[in-house]
Image (cartoon, grey):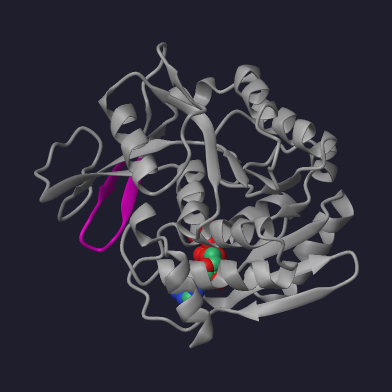
Amino acid sequence: KVIVFGSINMDLVARSPRLPIPGETILGRDFFTAPGGKGANQAVASARLGIPTQLVGRIGDDNFGRSLLTHLQTFGVQTEHILIDKTAHSGVAIIAVDDSGQNNIIVVPGANGCVNGTDVKNLINLWDNAAVLLLQFEIPLTAVISAAKAAKSVGVKVILDPAPAQIDIPDDFYPLVDIITPNEIEAAQLVGFPVNNFDTAANAASVLLQKGVGTAIVKLGAQGVYCATADSTFFISAFRVQTVDTVAAGDAFNGGLVAAIAEGRSLREGVVWGAAAGAISTTKPGAMSSMCDRETLDRFLNE
Ligand code: ADP
């Protein structure tokens, strides 16, 4: 099974003709809430593909938290080890979007920011039958690192999506990572030079391998995916689809990748599943609601 240790948020989205300037109040046109957070999105992406997927993290003791749990369960994610933190509110992202598609976002981590060693201890009880631990950077780095150490010590594969981009990853973290999956921006932050095409992705991947990761996968949006291990490299072009909204394409990719790996498939198959799940997710609006199920993935790959 797959264990995801990460963030759970409620997105509060308001649309208005333009974004307000500081001090200004304007009328919005519509509003909706949507479950999100990279941890939660990636757990849904994996669970939708039929892989038993446990999400470990925290929500607050509030209506957003209860709604988030219900959504996750509806999507098939195992939620028994999500802790309800009485001292914090559920994580929220307050998102303003204007007619040209520009946005302003405030993320308030709330309960996500309270994740600590207690949650890592909970994780340790879940290693039986676990193939993969999937991590991102929307919970405190210290918790992410100790989870990676714990997984590594029992032979559970560590897959890290280094998102959102953050610069101070300690050098001794990289060797704990079996597979790292940055997008262009995150790869550029990690290696210190721009990454936006095949050549720069190849250079970035070799820097990441030198830092000690087992496999580097660089997600290049509509271009595709570059993948490198110590003894092989390959590139998978993006699938051509009718894209309407690229929100959470990277999360869909990671769900597809871990699902294939948890099923014992090859790295190449994992990257193909990721690229397919990523492409399919761009054909639908939203984050969790754009994650494909297994039947859709199989049909897409057989076309
Ligand atoms: P992120 O959402 O983290 O920025 P990417 O945009 O690189 O990540 O998307 C992840 C993967 O999803 C890409 O590597 C690609 O395989 C697939 N993908 C993303 N955007 C498109 C697109 N417009 N068309 C087809 N596939 C896409």
Decide which of 177, 191 is in the foreground and name it. 177
Count of marks overlaid on the render: 0
User: Is 169 or 44 nearer to us in this picture?
Assistant: 44
Viewer can see residue 242? yes
User: Looking at the image, which residue sits at the far front?
Assistant: 129
- Is residue 110 depicted above or below 280 in this figure? above
- Residue 188, given in percent of the width and then of the height, sits at 67, 57
Q: Nearer the viewer, residue 158 or 139?
A: 158
Q: Is residue 280 above or below residue 251?
A: below
Residue 156 at x, y percent in the picture: 76, 43
Instruction: Point out the residue furthest to the top here.
Output: 87
Q: Is residue 142 left or right of residue 78?
A: right
Q: Tell me which residue sits at (21%, 43%) in the image.
A: 20
Above or below, 124 relative to 178: above
Instruction: Tell me the residue at 20%/32% (across/down).
Output: 23
Rendered location of residue 55, percent (x, y): 52, 38
Q: Is residue 97 magenta?
A: yes
Q: Is residue 297 magenta?
A: no
Name the spot of residue 100 as percent of width and height, x first: 25, 63
Which span of residues is magenta-colored?
Answer: 94-105
